[in-house]
Image: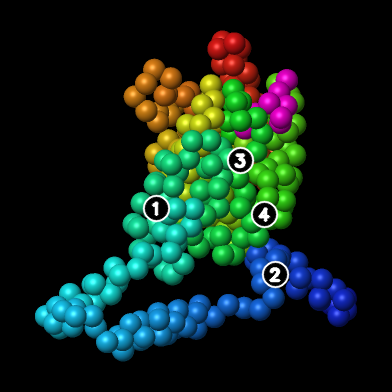
Amino acid sequence: MIPHPPPVTTREAAAALLEWYGDAGIDTIVLDAPRDRFAETAAEIESRAARRAPEASAPPRDGAGAAERSLSPPAASRREAHAAPPPTVDGFPALSLAVPDEIAVADAHQRAASAKTLDELREALAGFTGCNLRLTATQLVFGDGNPDADVMFVGEAPGREEDIAGEPFVGKSGQLLDRMLASIGMTRESVRVTNSVPWRPPGNRPPTPIETEMCLPFIARQIELVRPKILVCLGSPAAKVILKTEEGILRLRGTWHDYTFGVGPGDTIPTLPMLHPAYLLRQPAQKKLAWRDLLALKARLDERA
């Protein structure tokens, strides 16, 4: 006879529901009330129409009325659209409404290229509104660590702990990364750590290809500004976007590749793909592969010392 499970109390059911919400990414209150973006768009359209109404009712200046009437309706619309400059953020067009993906990517390239320092790059990224991940994330998670590091680690995207703290690799995977560095005589303070996507995707889902493409100019510029001697891609998503390959991490790890961002003699960085610490927490048996990669990293550093 199959025994019946013990009854679940209300407290246990509530705790299980909260845990399920956390796994689904419903763990952070972004605003006090939900945002109706359809209503916001309609209000913006009405506001623009109201601003144009006084201009349309005002008597035209001498000669201006005939010139305006001579314009065809499409030409008049274009004139109205270009009458006032668009709003800007830090000198760049403010993308407050939905924009085509290609425009957002172009905006990301322009902002990233304009940054001359890591602080300027962080400000440019904070002002970038083309990626909607920023709307669900708690805060921006930029790079952390030594800005002149010899080794730079790039992961995929922040997790829950990183989203709360605003720093990369601070959760369990970050703690494991610290121990991995210590095993070869390195410290967290001596390296640079970051992610290819700086905002946490809702529910810890993988970033979409277009979200990754929008953020790529910023991580590429960050690598260029740090100019590490060695670049380490943690996990398959980071390795694929940095090395522009479709190979999985188990095929890529353990082999050296080149990351090139320019044509100068110092614009090519030896790159080592490694298993992500989060993967190692789920698959402890694979730590032997990570140890081999750490030894290879240490040997390459010793050669370049």
Q: Are marks 4 and 2 in contact (CB under 8 Å)?
A: no
- Measure the alpha-carbon separation of dots 4 and 1: 24 Å
Query: Does dot 1 land on a helix, a strand or a loop?
Result: helix
Which label number is shown at residue 120? none
Magenta-tinted stretch: 185-192
Residue 38 at x, y percent in the picture: 47, 81
* Disc 2 residue type (three-letter): Ile
Query: Does dot 4 land on a helix, a strand or a loop?
Result: helix
Crowd band around label 3 with a 10 angstrom C-alpha radius: few (<14), some (14–19), many (20+): many
Which label number is shown at residue 143? 3
The quadrant of the rendering that contains the C terminus is: top right
Residue 86 at x, y percent in the picture: 38, 65
Q: Residue at x 52, y 49 (%)?
A: 125
Residue for badge 2: 29
Residue for badge 4: 163
* Mark with earlier residue (4, 2): 2
- Measure the alpha-carbon separation of dots 4 and 2: 12 Å
- Measure the alpha-carbon separation of dots 2 and 3: 24 Å
